[in-house]
Amino acid sequence: MDLRTTPALLYLDAVSVSFDGFKALNGLSLTIAPGEMRAIIGPNGAGKTTMMDVITGKTRPDEGEVLFDGSHDLTALDEASIAVLGIGRKFQKPTVFDSHTVEDNLRLALAGDRRARTAVAWRETAAARERMSSILETIRLTAARSRLAGNLSHGQKQWLEIGMLLAQDPKLLLVDEPVAGMTDAETHQTAELLRTINVEKTVVVVEHDMTFVRALGVKVTVLHEGRVLAEGSIDQVSENERVVEVYLGR
Amino acid sequence: MIPRALDRGTIVFLALLGAVAIAVPLLNLALPDSSPLHVPTYLVSLFGKYVCFALLALSIDLIWGYCGILSLGHGAFFALGGYAMGMYLMRQIGGRGVYGNPLLPDFMVFLNWKELPLAWWGFSSFPYAMLMVLAVPGLLALVFGWFAFRSRVTGVYFSIITQAMTFALLLAFFRNDFGFGGNNGLTDFKDILGFNVQADGTRAALFATSCLALMLGYVVCRILVASKFGMVLIAIRDAEARARFLGYRVESYKLAVFTISACMAGVAGALYVPQVGIINPGEFSPANSIEAVIWVAVGGRGTLAGAVIGAVLVNYAKTTFTSGALAPYWLFLLGGLFVGVTLWLPRGIVGTIAHWRAGRRITATEDAPDPSGAAVATKPQAAE
Ligand SMILES: Nc1ncnc2c1ncn2[C@@H]1O[C@H](COP(=O)(O)OP(=O)(O)O)[C@@H](O)[C@H]1O
Ligand SMILES: [Mg+2]
């Protein structure tokens, strides 16, 4: 019983969102293939975050179609259901649970039963502990595992949030500006981390930082005024006249 | 689940409460009036009142301290529990009322009512009344919370509508035709389970029962907050959107904890009424709910023990001040206390102590790193 209408993992068609008449997304169409990593760039206000809001159920589009895995209509679901379907999201501003330890942040993110009525009797499994340790290694926070997340540095918080995405074990990761506020070394490490993650998972990264995007070495989509302006390799899009105009002109 | 909930602090706290539950009635009943250690009956009732307030404060701390839900209408759940108990006590009066009507409470006879309203049916049965003590506040919280949380009403908007809720109930209960005694409320109680409510023994028993209820409430709160359920509550308090995007249905968690909290407040109200001998619509006054929140802020939110300590301390201060020459200034003092705590002691009494001790522990472990791995380190119980 395959109801797939598209081979794409994520399929957006003619999506529009307006806030008080202002069109934050204006007929945006985009497809992401399974296993792909895609970088999304675009000037401030291009609608990148709004696009993620639409995909994750935070914002309902006025028009358009949003399909996940070919068969799930994301416009009809709420955030929690979409997360459970297998879409994880990192916010633009790092958002972790400040008064929980690093470990507990990951513990809460680990895939598993999310229901309130079973949460009181919940017990941690050995497999979960192992998985947590391996994620801690990946995000280089093993030494900080019992520290309160609120006491981490900005870069560490970004990494913890990425670790929480991993723990969630989604099919698709949406990562909004992961290197904002990071040092050059951290930026480099983050690019590496995302490439590692991409071995198993589909990733969509929104970023401003061109060196970072270049380091990722993946197909780039340029958004402008709520729609796709150009698509291709980083070299192709940076030679595109309209892209240059949007970024440098005006 | 139980061992994690009953940590050392909890056991000490429960032991202290248990000791008080035994000592106060004993010092009242077993010692002669002349003994310097004798606790007079009026003090037993006064302390009993504090214990009920402590349970109300605990119920507020569970939602505010752990889940960030600031209810400014918890007095309503307290009062509803109180009315349920009051209705039982009214039915126990039977034919001994001023008008001697075996079925109808005096105020109904006075209003010329001929039969018992539907809402009063069954309240002559103690088990039924106790069920209502939980069910009425619980159901109201369930319905109210369902609408509020599903529509994602949060923060100050939520606080405002809870104030509106308690105010609406205040107005309703003031009306004679609402059927709960109008502005006089319910009073002149005679006995509870066949025991005279005025008798020393009954008062001592009510005090001990209140302490037991507080202990039970404390254990329930500890089990909840020490479980994954509690971890999710704190997560919601810290970053609600993050919790949603991790797949947690925030509204279910909020609704569950809000309803449990309302039931606890109802029990507190039910135990309060026989000890003070009256319940009237004044208990719904919005100011009462705000006062209860201040107790929690003073004691330290998100600590449970702080709520209990705050409630007892502030009410003790209130008793002291309102019985002296400074009585007219009590509200100013309470307001000043709240502002002072917010400015200089934002973690409250217990929160500040816990924070200070956690700080010392961290410095200590940094001096001597623990080779057994930091994973077992106790995490500070969400002091903020
Ligand atoms: N909730 C909102 N209400 C009103 N305007 C919004 C809202 N969210 C985004 N916008 C507007 O939509 C546009 C796109 O925003 P955003 O998606 O955050 O851009 P980007 O992430 O590409 O910088 C901006 O002009 C922003 O001001
Ligand atoms: Mg953005």
Image: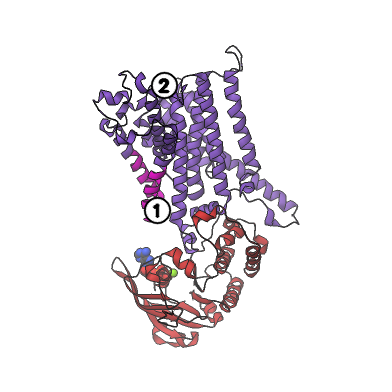
Chain colours: A red, B purple
Q: Position of residue B327 (x, y in %)?
A: 43, 23
Q: Position of residue B181 (x, y in %)?
A: 31, 28
State ligand 2's quadrant. Answer: bottom left
How crowded is the residue under tag 2: few (<14 C-alpha within 10 Å), some, or many (20+)? Answer: many
Gap in angstroms between the C-alphas marked 1 and 2: 42 Å
Identify which amino acid the numbered label 2 is placed on.
Lys
Query: Which residue is disc 2 drawn over?
Result: B190
Q: Position of residue A249 (x, y in %)?
A: 39, 80
Q: Chain of mark 2?
A: B
Query: Which residue is disc 1 drawn over?
Result: B149
- Main SS class of the magenta portion in the image: helix
Query: A66 left or right of B380?
Result: left
| A24 part of magenta stretch | no
**Which one is in front, A160 or A166?**
A166
**Which one is in front, A21 or B312?**
B312
Tell me the residue at 74%/52% (across/down).
Answer: B367
Residue B384 visible? The answer is no
Nearer to us of marks 1 and 2 is: 2
How crowded is the residue under tag 1: few (<14 C-alpha within 10 Å), some, or many (20+)? Answer: some
Tell me the residue at 43%/38% (across/down).
Answer: B131
Q: Are marks 1 and 2 in contact (CB under 8 Å)?
A: no
Tell me if residue B85 comes above or below residue B237 in the rendering.
above
Tell me if residue B23 comes above or below residue A60 in the rendering.
above
Question: What are the residue bounds of the magenta stretch?
Answer: B138-167
